[in-house]
Amino acid sequence: MNKEISPIHSYFKLPNTISLVAGSSEGKTPLNAFDGALLDAGIGNVNLIRISSIMPPKAEIVPLPKLPMGALVPTAYGYIISETPGETISAAISIAIPKDEDLCGLIMEFEGVCGKKEAEEKVREMAKIGFEMRGWELKEIKSIAVEHTVEKLGCAFAAAALWYK
């Protein structure tokens, strides 16, 4: 029996929903600070699968729903951990949305020793540059950022979580 092989795209379900989240935390160890920042962002009880920075065409940006514990969640993220008391650290994420709905969006992430405003400005600028590199027209940019002033050991985290709804 000779079965016709389906096109490759039929094997992959594109995520059609995306949420921007950010959080920060202190921790006793770097990993505990990171875990606390994930909890603060609302995605601490799922498994993040780190992805590069492409949003599928026509994906809808929505507030983060309650995700099932242990879910595998494709996520683009940036984070920074610092053990310098008094230092301000920030993480930011942006999504550049194209005018042409058949094109993908771009997700950009940034982390650094700076304030929230500077981090968000940088990540938005990176999104604009990504569109310029592709020669695409930009419809809009959505972004979120968080800053954290380190007490002993802190983490700032920002992410775009994608899933199929």
Image (cartoon, rainbow, N blue to C red):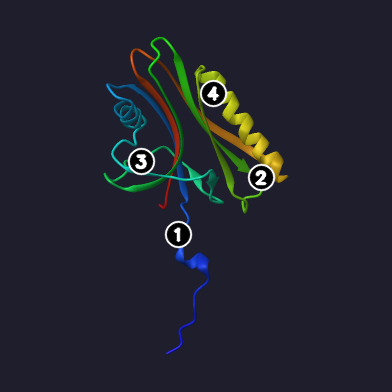
Q: Is residue 108 above or below residue 87?
A: below
Residue type highlighted by circle 1: Lys
Q: Point out residue 95 in the picture as x, y percentages from the top left corner.
A: 55, 38
Residue type highlighted by circle 3: Pro
Name which of mark 2 and mark 1 comes first in the sequence. Answer: 1
- The answer to whether any part of residue 136 appears in the image is no
Nearer the viewer's eye, disc 2 or disc 1? Answer: 1
Q: Gap between marks 4 and 3, in whole Å?
A: 25 Å
The residue depicted at 55 percent of the width and 25 percent of the height is: 120
Q: Gap between marks 3 and 1, in whole Å?
A: 19 Å
Residue highlighted by disc 4: 119
SS assignment at label 2: loop
Residue highlighted by disc 1: 13
Residue highlighted by disc 2: 99
Relative to 157, 39 lies left or right: left
SS assignment at label 4: helix
Q: Is residue 108 above or below residue 119?
A: below
Name which of mark 2 and mark 4 comes first in the sequence. Answer: 2
Name which of mark 1 and mark 4 comes first in the sequence. Answer: 1
The residue depicted at 42 percent of the width and 52 percent of the height is: 164
Name which of mark 3 and mark 2 comes first in the sequence. Answer: 3
> Can you tell which mark lies on residue 65?
3
SS assignment at label 3: loop
